[in-house]
Amino acid sequence: MRPRPTILVKLLVAFAVPTAVLFGLFAVIAHEIARDRLDDELGARLTSVAASAATQVRGKYLVELGPGAEADRGYQNARRKLLAVAAATGVRLYVFDAQFESRVDTADGVAIGTHYYQAELDRDELGRVLKDGATVASVTFTGDDDRTYKAGYAPIRATDDEGAPIVLAIAAQAPAESFELLADLRQNLLLWGAALVAAILIATFVVAALVTRPVRQLAAAAARIGEGELTAPVVVTSTDEIGRLAGTMDRMRAQLGERDARLQQMLAGIAHEVRNPLAGMALFTGLLKDELDEDDARRGHALRIARELGYLERVVTEFLDYARRPRPELGPVPLAGLCAEVAELATPEAEAAGVALEVEATGTVTADHGQLRRALLNLTKNAIQASTTAPRLVRLTAGLDGDRAILAVANRGAPIPETALPHLFEPFFTTREKGTGLGLAFVADIARDHGGAVEVACGDGVTTFRVILPVAGPEARA
């Protein structure tokens, strides 16, 4: 059987998991929105710087510069102006042509004609700059120093005339420092998310404990009531729905106790009212039998009446024993001695039926000696009566199997009908012409009160009843 999820698991699934997922989704969305806004803002600032710097240089002078012309006055003048803008804005400025080769760069050591591979990656954006005169921003990229950068591009015309042709492009490049702050934000979101999940888990565990503790108490109380323990009250610890349920269970316990007490009184009254006339009839039947001669036919009738009265006495006794059986008084029970007692008690009936008894037992179990003997004796007598196939033998075995004790009674005879197997341990169910149907129910209740169970198996002409108990007693199984 698959284990059912506990209340704690259900609370985690209902609250902790959705909250963690929603917070994670919120963190991702917030991070991406912040990144997009910062990216757009940085791009707008850099394109603005690039457009402003483009007005400081004349494209017709720079486009004619070739490699090694760094000493040219026009180059020096343009670089000085760009350096001033770079110093004021904190960006790197560089001018390049349509082949992505440098004309002026504010970075030291960049010669005329140096190829800008990073700008070449923005070929599509720069096509709009050089052809349409648009100002555009690049995507962010990682530089050689592993920092994140972004560039803004603007066109440079040949002259100041608005309609002059576009001959060069200028780039304003700067590290995306705000993205480093964004990384800190992401780390903080992760930390806060972890803290939130931990807080939810702790709160879920606390709530689950507050909810499940009274539920476990109610379950234990229900188990006690089911076992017939009707004296211990069901403790009410709250005024909520669980508290009202506990109050209802306690009223049910009290009502069951009252009904059980009335039943006990009724059974005692019935036993008294039935046993008194039975005792009188048995007495007078004995007197009648003694007054009749051995060869008198009426003596057989008297003997039959005596047998039937004995049967009625056993029926009354079985009803009372089943209804008034006390809770087990546990103690160490040597299985060898127990089985020897059972065999000794069953020997007269076995000899009368021509059935041999065989006993094999070892080990010790914690149980109620009297009740366990009663259960085994009941099974043994049933086996003697059912032993109809030669060799007529009943085997009584007992031993330990790990933390279990297995007590088995086997006999050879007609198998139990398949239709009867599911009902064998139900009270008042019997396949015999004479029988109360309480014997096997009595055995099953004794095994259950000891924390065990009864099994039956039929095969190869052998019927075996097995009583399986925990070695250490019912508390070990709880």
Image: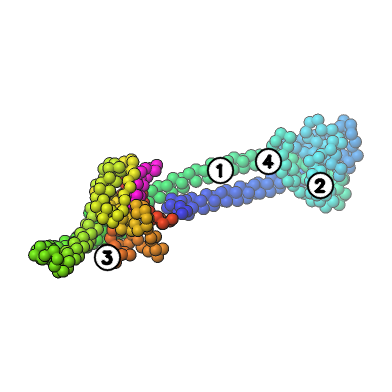
Q: Marks 1 and 3, Cα distance to the nearest angstrom? A: 78 Å
Q: Position of residue 313 (x, y in %)?
A: 18, 61
Report the amino acid beneath label 2. Answer: Arg
Residue at x-position 45% and y-position 52%: 3
Residue 301 in the magenta stretch? The answer is: no
Residue 229 visible to an observer of this rendering: no
Front disc: 3 or 2: 3
Residue wearing tag 2: 123
Task: Locate residue 4 relative to residue 91 in the image: left or right.
Answer: left
**Do labels 2 and 4 touch, CB within 8 Å?**
no
Residue wearing tag 3: 434
Q: Please give the label number shown on residue 176.
A: 4
Q: Marks 1 and 4, Cα distance to the nearest angstrom? A: 22 Å
Q: Tell me which numbered mark, 3 or 2, is placed earlier along the sequence.
A: 2
Q: Marks 2 and 1, Cα distance to the nearest angstrom? A: 37 Å
Region rendered in magenta: 394-408
Q: Marks 2 and 4, Cα distance to the nearest angstrom? A: 21 Å
Question: Between residues 396 and 317, which one lies in front from this camera angle?
Answer: 396
Front disc: 4 or 3: 3
Front disc: 1 or 4: 1
Q: Tell me which numbered mark, 2 or 4, is placed earlier along the sequence.
A: 2
Q: Please give the label number shown on residue 190.
A: 1
Q: Tell me which numbered mark, 1 or 4, is placed earlier along the sequence.
A: 4
